[in-house]
Image (cartoon, helix red, strand yellow):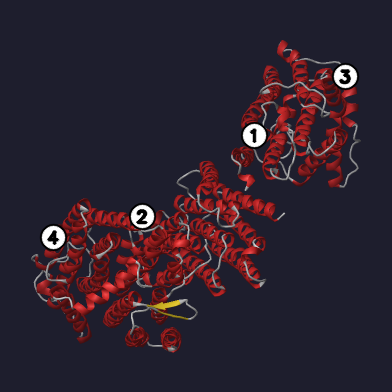
């Protein structure tokens, strides 16, 4: 049951990644990333064997649902509302091609995980490969979307990969460090959102075309 | 022994107070005094840290999550020196820029708070023994320092800040993956990991180290992930550029140095981790050699020069043996000379009103004091003989040559020579080319004079005569990276 | 084998018009209406067969021959999907290609008969039909290939193993895109609205505009047989054959095919017809899910 749930959640994470790659509007991406946040907060309950006691399961779950599924999407929602005029992503690589690349990346990460010496760790290869796929897909979004909000969302996909990996590989970090990791993420996104509003005020645009003057 | 716990608590308290106090201050110049005061306090405390190092054993405290050993102490010293100097320089710098800019008190309050938070996080990075804590503190430095860059609020600095924030966050995110993979075995402190390194899976650890090297390497400005560095360094206010170059890059490299013995011991000394550092180091050198000749912006030139020197440090560590000691020496040398170069160029840019090197001419005649500082620091950065960078670079070259790695030796010589030629051309034109007549006012405060004189003296002293005690200290610190002490 | 073929054909002929009735009844239920009787399609067919065909003067023999060809080729395709397990059924290597190209043959004649009338509306419907089916076809084949990977055979019979504890996720990843393809192939919402009578937006219905009498009856019947065939394949993909006894399997199949119709009706009630530009996106998404399932079936990931 637990194994099957893990498989299901990993696949849903992969599908949400592909959805993010395929969506052409920042609002759609926001929905996708919020859904991914909800999926992530289920994960800690599926790895009870890695944790010592209920607190160490509840805290990451509660933190991830408040931060990844509520606070960060709320920040992004606010900033998207503010820069309402500009929703387009102007990608370097078109959406269908991105999705196909994302699909190949997901498959590649399954193949890749098989080769890694993980067998001595009791971890789920499904979540691990979903995590590795998320790393690359996050970077793909960051590097091919010429819109700062989309880049933030790409960064979130990338960060989620770290969270998945941290949960699925037995993490022995003290609790205060896990909380620190989450707060760092929250603060980072907050700073990025502030920066986006600055960029919008100064350039009257959230496309990155105007952010290409320092090149040499 | 309760002493280290006490000191670090005190250290943290100082900075927290320093972060809070600006909230109650109205006058911008007073706000900027606070970073200076807390730097002085931190400097004094680091003298006390030294007493914790009586015996050569490292001291663990706070449940093994923090550590003080010679390597950490050395880097703490570099952090404190550069921050102190930048704190002093900052006073004059902002006093001057306040005449032209119309920044509000809010702006300076934010700067003062973020600056001290930044310094605290760098100190925690260096004192941390927990791989997770190192990561948290490193990520915090990115977040805190992002808004330091746009202190001169214009479109270019905003662009630079965005690149810095995004690229470094991604880089640090990669380092997080690596950290998780290392912690997968259930151990999460550097010292324990080293002790149990032989029980770890060598392939997994090496795989993790690639993530760590790429991740923290991004923050350190190692090629090919250095693309944020020239932008951020050139657009930030000068004191920030100085601490970025002089401290932050070292701190990121420091974490890689901490991982290195673990990876090597897990892999049975196969040297693969060292090869990774050599590769990125030479790439950095190559990139710098290609990009330095085409620069026109003075601070951008210095930024690419940082890429070069970080690359040299990585090469030194990658070579191992004497190279590691030389690399550690190079950390201090580079921090001092780059700091001085940034200070000088900051003043020069302010007086000339331009950062275009083609328009800055006749510096030695027009601004003798800062001109001398500029000349000396640039010559030092090029690796000219009487200065200490020459010694550290020479030791690295010697390691490569005596180790029989002639290809690396040749590449290193070629890279540094190319950079030497183009930097020399820029420096000579700036310093001596016939410019407009007449001196620029360029008031040089007594404190600034002290910074210039002391840094130049240290650079010269270490270049002419390296105190054997100091060298012995460095060798012991290098032992930690080489594996053997912890 | 003869018994099974006869059974398949008989079931398709007799039961298929029921599905359209169930779908309409479901939609009526969601809309709060009483709706037409479940057997409405039977009455319609019966009425149409008694009527005389009127044929456009501009139409050629293709238009007259098409209904018979469409009907027979669709009916012939059903014999590869046996109704009762255990009995021998026609099967050979890659018979699924024949199955789907028999359907392709019927589509081809549907399209050229629509073009044959010379009506611009029908030409437009034909072009859309060709476009959407070209997008749907790769998805169909990928899903079938995935099922064959799991079943370990080359005939479509091997694909019908049903859900099992170790491969359920792949089967879900196959059934969902296949269901979407079914909606597209059978001109259901969100791809086409079978109830609309605005020629500009219709796809399937518009191609039948010039047919009447027995010709129209054959066309409608063929369409419902096609719907029956796809529903049956979905059911067989999902029902675990190995655990169930043949009797239980047959009984469940008879219950499950109307259930697919009910689901289709539900989908049609909760969704609106997608704009024509969205249709390729929908089919593309289905293809991506299908490919994900296919990739997962390539390696033994599930043994982990």
Q: Is residue B477 left or right of residue A136?
A: left
Residue identifier under label 4? B425
Q: Where is residue C118 shown, x and y percent of the image?
A: 67, 18
Task: Classify mark 2: helix, strand or loop.
Answer: helix
Label 1 neighbour load within 10 Å: few <14, some 14-19, many 20+: some
Residue identifier under label 3? C49
Q: Please state the chain letter of the residue tagged with numbered disc 4 in the rendered image.
A: B
Residue identifier under label 1? C149
Extreme residue toward the top, this view: C61
Q: Quadrant of residue C133?
A: top right
Q: Residue at x 83, y 42 (%)?
A: C27
- Between B476 and B253, the one lying in front of the other is B476
Q: Where is residue B467 shown, x and y percent of the image?
A: 18, 78
The answer to whether residue C258 is above or below residue A133 is above
Distance from Cα at disc 4 to Cα at disc 1: 68 Å
Q: Where is residue C246 shown, x and y percent of the image?
A: 85, 33
Task: Classify mark 1: helix, strand or loop.
Answer: helix
């Amino acid at each position: 049951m637990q194994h099957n749930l893990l498989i299901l959640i990993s696949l849903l994470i992969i599908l949400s990644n592909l959805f993010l790659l395929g969506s052409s509007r920042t609002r759609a991406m926001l929905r996708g990333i919020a859904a991914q946040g909800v999926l992530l907060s289920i994960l800690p309950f599926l790895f009870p064997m890695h944790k010592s006691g209920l607190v160490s399961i509840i805290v990451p779950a509660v933190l991830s649902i408040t931060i990844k599924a509520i606070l960060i999407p709320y920040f992004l929602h606010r900033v998207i509302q503010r820069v309402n005029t500009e929703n387009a992503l102007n990608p370097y690589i078109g959406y269908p091609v991105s999705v196909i690349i994302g699909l190949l990346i997901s498959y590649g990460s399954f193949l890749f995980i098989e080769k890694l010496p993980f067998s001595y760790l009791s971890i789920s290869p499904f979540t691990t490969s979903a995590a590795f796929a998320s790393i690359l897909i996050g970077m793909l979004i960051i590097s091919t979307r010429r819109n700062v909000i989309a880049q933030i969302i790409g960064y979130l996909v990338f960060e989620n990969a770290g969270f998945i990996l941290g949960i699925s590989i037995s993490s022995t970090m003290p609790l205060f460090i896990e909380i620190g990791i989450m707060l760092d993420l929250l603060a980072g996104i907050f700073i990025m959102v502030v920066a986006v509003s600055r960029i919008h005020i100064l350039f009257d645009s959230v496309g990155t075309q105007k952010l290409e003057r320092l090149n040499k | 022994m309760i002493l280290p716990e006490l000191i670090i608590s005190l250290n943290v308290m100082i900075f927290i107070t320093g972060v809070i106090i600006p909230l109650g201050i109205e006058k911008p110049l007073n706000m900027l005094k606070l970073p200076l005061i807390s730097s002085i306090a931190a400097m004094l405390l680091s003298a006390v840290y030294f007493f914790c190092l009586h015996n050569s054993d490292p001291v663990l405290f706070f449940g093994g999550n923090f550590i003080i050993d010679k390597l950490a102490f050395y880097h703490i010293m570099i952090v404190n020196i550069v921050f102190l100097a930048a704190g002093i320089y900052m006073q004059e710098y902002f006093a001057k820029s306040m005449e032209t800019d119309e920044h509000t008190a809010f702006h300076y309050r934010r700067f003062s708070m973020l600056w001290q938070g930044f310094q605290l996080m760098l100190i925690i990075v260096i004192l941390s023994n927990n791989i997770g804590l190192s990561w948290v503190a490193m990520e915090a430095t990115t977040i805190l320092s992002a808004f330091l860059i746009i202190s001169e609020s214009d479109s270019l600095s905003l662009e630079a800040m965005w690149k810095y924030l995004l690229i470094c966050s991604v880089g640090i995110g990669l380092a997080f993956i690596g950290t998780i993979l290392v912690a997968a075995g259930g151990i999460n402190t550097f010292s324990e990991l080293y002790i149990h390194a032989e029980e770890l899976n060598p392939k997994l650890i090496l795989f993790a180290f690639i993530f760590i090297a790429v991740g923290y390497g991004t923050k350190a400005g190692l090629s090919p992930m250095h693309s944020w560095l020239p932008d951020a360094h050139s657009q930030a206010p000068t004191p920030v550029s100085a601490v970025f170059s002089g401290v932050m890059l070292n701190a990121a490299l420091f974490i890689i140095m901490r991982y290195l013995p673990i990876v090597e011991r897990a892999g049975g000394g196969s040297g693969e981790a060292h090869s990774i550092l050599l590769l990125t180091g030479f790439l950095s050198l190559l990139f710098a050699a290609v990009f330095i000749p085409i620069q026109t912006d003075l601070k951008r030139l210095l930024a690419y020069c940082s890429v070069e020197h970080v690359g040299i440090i990585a090469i030194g560590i990658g070579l191992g043996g004497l190279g590691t000691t030389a690399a550690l020496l190079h950390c201090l040398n580079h921090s001092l000379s780059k700091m001085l170069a940034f200070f000088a160029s900051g003043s020069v840019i302010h007086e000339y009103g331009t950062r275009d090197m083609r328009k800055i001419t006749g510096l030695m005649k027009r601004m003798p004091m800062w001109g001398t500082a500029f000349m000396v620091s640039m010559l030092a950065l090029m690796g000219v003989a009487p200065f200490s960078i020459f010694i550290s670079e020479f030791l690295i070259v010697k390691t490569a040559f005596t180790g029989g790695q002639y290809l690396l030796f040749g590449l290193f010589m070629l890279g540094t020579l190319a950079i030497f030629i183009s930097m020399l051309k820029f420096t000579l034109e700036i310093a001596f080319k016939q410019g407009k007549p007449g001196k620029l006012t360029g008031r040089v405060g007594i404190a600034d004079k002290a910074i210039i004189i002391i840094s130049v003296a240290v650079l010269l002293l270490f270049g002419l005569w390296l105190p054997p005690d100091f060298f012995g200290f460095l060798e012991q610190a290098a032992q930690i990276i080489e594996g053997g002490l912890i | 084998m003869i018994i099974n073929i006869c059974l398949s054909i008989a079931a398709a002929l007799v039961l298929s018009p029921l599905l359209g009735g169930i779908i309409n009844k479901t939609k009526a239920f969601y809309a709060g209406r009483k709706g037409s009787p479940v057997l409405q399609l039977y009455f319609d067919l019966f009425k149409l067969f008694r009527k005389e065909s009127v044929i456009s003067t501009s139409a050629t023999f293709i238009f007259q021959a098409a209904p018979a060809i469409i009907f027979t080729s669709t009916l012939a395709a059903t014999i590869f999907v046996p109704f009762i397990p255990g009995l021998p059924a026609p099967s050979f290597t890659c018979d699924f290609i024949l199955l789907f190209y028999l359907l392709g043959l019927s589509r081809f004649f549907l399209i050229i008969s629509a073009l044959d009338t010379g009506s611009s509306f029908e030409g437009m419907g034909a072009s859309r039909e060709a476009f959407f089916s070209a997008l749907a076809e790769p998805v169909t084949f990928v899903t079938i290939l995935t099922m064959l990977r799991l079943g370990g055979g080359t005939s479509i019979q091997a694909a019908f193993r049903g859900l099992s504890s170790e491969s359920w996720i792949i089967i879900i990843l196959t059934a969902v895109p296949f269901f979407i393809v079914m909606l597209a192939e059978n001109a259901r919402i969100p791809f086409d609205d079978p109830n609309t009578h605005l020629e500009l937006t219709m796809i399937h219905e518009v191609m039948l505009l010039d047919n009447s009498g027995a010709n129209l009856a054959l066309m409608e019947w063929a369409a419902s047989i096609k719907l029956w065939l796809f529903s049956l394949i979905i059911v067989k993909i999902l029902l675990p054959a190995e655990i169930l006894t043949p009797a239980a399997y047959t009984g469940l199949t008879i219950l499950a095919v109307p259930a697919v119709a009910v689901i289709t009706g539900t989908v049609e009630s909760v969704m609106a017809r997608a704009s024509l530009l969205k249709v390729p996106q929908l089919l593309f998404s289905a293809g991506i899910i299908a490919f994900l399932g296919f990739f997962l079936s390539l390696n033994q990931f599930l043994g982990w």
